[in-house]
Amino acid sequence: MVRVIRGESATESEVMRTEDALALAEELSLDLVEVGPNQNPPVCRLLDYGRFRYRQSKKEREARKASRGATQQREVRMSPVISENDINSKIRIVKGLLDEGAKVRVAVTFRGRQQTHPEIAMRVLRKVAEGVKDYAKLERAPTMEGRALAIMLAPDKVLQQQQKKEQQPAGASEDTDADGAIENA
C-alpha cells in the first residue's frame, strides 16, 4: 500500500496498492517516484521524472551562479605616478565594487625603473586604503606580485550598515519609500 499524490498540489492523494499505482503511472505515461519512504503508508508522487530532474538541475545552476556572484573578486589597477584626482576617482570605483559585495584587489603596476621606488606605490595604496576604511577591511597587506604591489580589500558589512544608518535623515525609518512617505500597512 502506498499513498499516491497526483498533480502539483499535495491535496489530491489516495491510498492504493503498489501494483495499481504502477499501472496508473503507466497509463498516464508518468513515473511513480517515492518521496516519503518513512511515512506510513509510504508516499509516492506521479510526475515526469525527466522534467523533474531538468528543473532541479536548472535550480542548482541558478544557485551556483548566484553564489559565485557573491564571492566575486574584482581588480582596480593604478600607476605609481597617478594624480590625486585620479586616486579619488579610483576610490569611488572601489567603493562601488565593495557595495556590490565584491572583494577588490587594488594593484599599483610598475613600469621600467619605477620598481626601484616601491615607497611611492605604498603611498598610493595607503591613500586608497584610508579612502575606503569606512567600507572595507584590509584582507591582505601589500605584497609584491610580479611587477605590481597589491592589497586585497573585503567589504565590511557592519561598517556599511552603520554608514547607511548615519546617512538616513533623523526620524526616518526603514519603512519609507523613495519619496520619504511611510507605506500604509
Image (tube, rainbow, N blue to C red):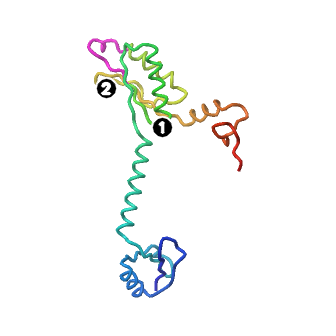
Q: Is residue 113 magenta?
A: yes
Q: Earlier in the sequence, mark 2 or mark 1?
A: 1
Q: Is residue 40 above or below residue 134?
A: below
Query: What is the three-letter code of the residue carrying label 1?
Result: Gly
Horizontal and vertical percent position of residue 167: 63, 30
Residue 132 higher or lower than 72, as above or below: above
Q: Mark 1 points at which residue?
A: 101
In-front residue for pair 51/117: 51
* Residue 88: image location, x then y, percent: 48, 19
Q: Do the residues labelled 2 and 1 touch (CB within 8 Å)?
A: no
**Does 89 appear above or below 45?**
above
Q: Where is residue 44 in the image (x, y as percent from the top left)?
A: 45, 77
Q: Is mark 1 on a helix, strand or loop?
A: loop
User: Disc 2 marks which amino acid?
Assistant: Glu
Which region is colored magenta? 107-118
Residue at x 49% of width, y 28% of height? 95
Choose top left, top right, bottom left or bottom right for residue 116.
top left
Q: Which residue is at 51% across, 83% downward?
A: 14
Name the residue rendered at 39%, 29% in the picture: 105
Task: Specify whether 86 is left or right of 165.
Answer: left
Tag 2 residue: 145
